[in-house]
Image: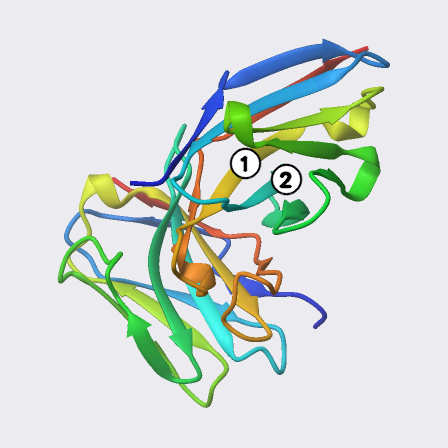
Amino acid sequence: AQSVTQLGSHVSVSEGALVLLRCNYSSSVPPYLFWYVQYPNQGLQLLLKYTTGATLVKGINGFEAEFKKSETSFHLTKPSAHMSDAAEYFCAVRLEGYSSASKIIFGSGTRLSIRP
Amino acid sequence: GAGVSQSPSNKVTEKGKDVELRCDPISGHTALYWYRQSLGQGLEFLIYFQGNSAPDKSGLPSDRFSAERTGGSVSTLTIQRTQQEDSAVYLCASSLVDSGWYEQYFGPGTRLTVT
């Protein structure tokens, strides 16, 4: 069965430092992978997604993620953290064989805090 | 409005009471989804609508949960005889069509507290 695991429920970095949020998935075929961000008291917003093609995906707000099949990973990075990046981040994978968005399963989330 | 709206934003209810949560999707979006977000957990899929039909109700946790959508627009999630374990944030999302290719747009959620 497909699943997605986010390592670290809480990550804290200093402003200007590298942001690295880890996500690993299990799938027998190349998956569709997503990162969502949830700012306080707001709904989720799509940051970026990988479907096919280039394995390095660029998203909004300077974030990017790289699909590494050999490591079954889709880690999210940003070179320099900004205070406005403080939020909850969710990794998600679409179940194989389904086209419906209802078959997207979400990780448990990582809360990112930024220290001044 | 430009985005998905949900009401109420907060709801406190006593155990055993019924509650109704409302979602107004983006105009023209045919697909609508309900999720539940519990503290420290990811999103749990509940149900989705394509138009007014609900092809997938597999995520509804019990028969106390039901949902409907009318006019291909507004949707209501009803929880009967609420229990404390129903306390969570209920998120609604809409999409132009139901496909993993198309982005889901999420509302701000309804925080339900059952006392």
Secondary-structure class at tag 1: strand
The dot on residue A40 is: none
Q: Earlier in the sequence, mark 2 or mark 1?
A: 2
Please give the name of the residue rendered at 50% of the width and 42% of the height, measured from the top-left corner.
A92
Q: Does B84 appear above or below B109? A: above
Q: CA distance from mark 2 to mark 1?
A: 6 Å
Q: Are marks 2 and 1 on the same chain?
A: yes
Q: Position of residue A25 (x, y in %)?
A: 45, 32
**Around disc 2, counting alpha carbons within 10 Å, would you say few (fewer than 14), some (14 to 19), or many (20 or more)?**
many
Identify residue for label 2. A37
Please give the name of the residue rendered at 40% of the width and 61% of the height, measured from the top-left corner.
A98
Q: Quadrant of the N terminus of chain A?
A: top left
Amino acid type indicated by mark 1: Phe
Give the letter of the chain under mark 2: A
Identify residue for label 1. A90
Q: Position of residue A48 (x, y in %)?
A: 69, 45
**Around disc 1, counting alpha carbons within 10 Å, would you say few (fewer than 14), some (14 to 19), or many (20 or more)?**
many
How many numbered tags mark residues here?
2
Give the letter of the chain under mark 1: A
Taking the image as shown, residue A38 lies to the left or right of residue A60, namely: left
Q: Are marks 2 and 1 in contact (CB under 8 Å)?
A: yes
Q: Position of residue A30 (x, y in %)?
A: 50, 44
Please give the name of the residue rendered at 22% of the width and 40% of the height, measured from the top-left corner.
B85
Q: Quadrant of the C terminus of chain A?
A: top right
Q: Does B99 appear above or below B41? A: below
Secondary-structure class at tag 2: strand
Amino acid type indicated by mark 2: Val
Q: Nearer the viewer, residue A67 or A59?
A: A67
Q: Position of residue B69 (x, y in %)?
A: 39, 80
Q: Does B80 appear above or below A91? A: below
